[in-house]
Image (tube, rainbow, N blue to C red):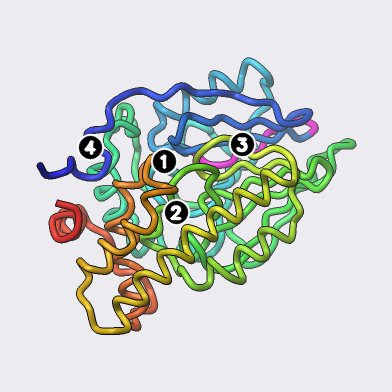
């Protein structure tokens, strides 16, 4: 029997958990759905990620407003994927902040990605008619951006660590509390989506830079918050391990001239015992392998995913 396309059959609502990680530092996790967070400044909020629609974002903001009524000055988007950014209008932020490469990606493939992700993960798009259009940053940076949180709250440091999940991923670091928001550069007990990735950079130098923060609490893109240095290191190691297994299995088949389908089957067999029961594993892996195959074939930048291409790759590899 053919597997349902991507996450189209995943219709069960996930239980959301709001955690206060430190004074004025919040994370919302949802059993493998995209994570989201917020950091209080002296008289303002910095929100991290925006979810897929304004309606979905408003549900998160209602939970957040049980703890703080401060206005949102900055909305930080870790990277561009539709499920992370299209809810931005609900925040009414003064500044929407991304890496400069993320702005370029929105211009290049924003509409295609929107259609692609809506088809793959319809449940995440609560009230899709509430989306006013593409989300555009109002400010960008290249390497580092520091937000003074005011009073005795210290700084929030936004840092580009290199190409990884996309060309433009950034992390948010709170040195005072040693809390790190990584976006999809790290997942804790959730499978990776790498369809727009730079696998070799990500698995090496980029994750090395993420690990160098020495976080004691880490909010990944999906999965539970990692608490304690050992758990943070383990989340980074798990992410690197997933990438390394893919690189080994796909690289071996590609290197000896085998077909893409064989590479997918080899990667699936090697990854499934450890990662197969984790959220979105079956959904992501065809797209992951297709992108990694491109890299081994010398295609530097990811081919744009469209709703049509999604179905073609799925039929070729997963059916």
Q: Which residue is mark 3?
A: 225
Q: Secondary structure at mark 2?
A: loop
Could you tell which of marks 2 and 1 lies nearer the N-terminus?
Answer: 2
Q: Nearer the viewer, mark 1 or mark 3?
A: 1
Could you say where residue 300 lies in the image, as x and y percent from the top left?
39, 78
Q: Is residue 9 left or right of residue 81?
A: left
Q: Is residue 200 left or right of residue 257?
A: right
Could you say where residue 163 lies in the image, as x and y percent from the top left?
53, 68
Please state, as top left, top right, bottom left or bottom right, where the N terminus lies in the image.
top left
Location of residue 257 (image quadrant) = bottom left
Q: Nearer the viewer, mark 2 or mark 1?
A: 1
Start-end of magenta stretch: 42-50
Q: Nearer the viewer, mark 4 or mark 1?
A: 1
Q: Which residue is mark 4?
A: 8
Q: CA distance from mark 3 to mark 2?
A: 22 Å
Q: Nearer the viewer, mark 4 or mark 2?
A: 4
- Residue at image coords 19%, 53%: 318
Could you say where residue 120 lies in the image, as x and y percent from the top left?
26, 44
Q: Secondary structure at mark 4?
A: loop
């Amino acid at each position: 029997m053919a597997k349902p396309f991507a996450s189209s059959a995943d219709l069960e609502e996930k239980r959301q958990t709001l955690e206060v990680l430190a004074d004025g530092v919040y994370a919302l996790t949802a059993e493998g759905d995209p994570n989201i967070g917020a950091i209080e400044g002296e008289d303002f909020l910095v929100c991290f990620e925006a979810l897929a629609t304004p309606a979905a974002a408003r549900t998160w903001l209602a939970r957040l407003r049980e703890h703080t009524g401060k206005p949102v000055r900055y909305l930080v988007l870790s990277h561009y994927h539709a499920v992370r950014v299209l809810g931005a209008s609900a925040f009414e932020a003064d500044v929407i902040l991304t890496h400069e490469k993320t702005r370029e990606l929105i211009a290049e493939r924003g509409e295609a990605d929107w259609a692609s992700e809506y088809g793959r993960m319809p449940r995440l798009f609560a009230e899709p008619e509430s989306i006013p259009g593409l989300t555009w940053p109002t400010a960008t940076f290249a390497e580092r951006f520091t937000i003074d949180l005011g009073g005795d709250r210290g700084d929030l440091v936004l840092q580009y660590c290199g190409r990884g999940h996309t060309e433009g991923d950034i992390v948010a670091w709170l040195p005072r509390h040693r809390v790190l928001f990584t976006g999809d550069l790290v997942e804790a007990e959730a499978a990776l989506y790498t369809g727009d990735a730079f696998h070799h950079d990500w698995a090496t130098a980029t994750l090395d830079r993420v690990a160098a923060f020495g976080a004691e609490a880490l909010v990944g893109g999906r999965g539970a918050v990692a608490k304690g240095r050992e758990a943070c290191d383990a989340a980074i190691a798990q992410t690197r391990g997933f990438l390394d297994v893919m690189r080994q299995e796909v690289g071996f088949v590609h290197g000896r001239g085998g077909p893409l389908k064989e590479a997918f089957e080899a990667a699936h067999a090697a990854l499934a015992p450890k990662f197969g029961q984790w959220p979105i594993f079956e959904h992501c892996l065809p797209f992951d392998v297709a992108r990694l195959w491109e890299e081994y074939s010398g295609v530097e930048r990811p081919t744009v995913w469209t709703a049509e291409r999604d179905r073609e790759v799925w039929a070729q590899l997963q059916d």
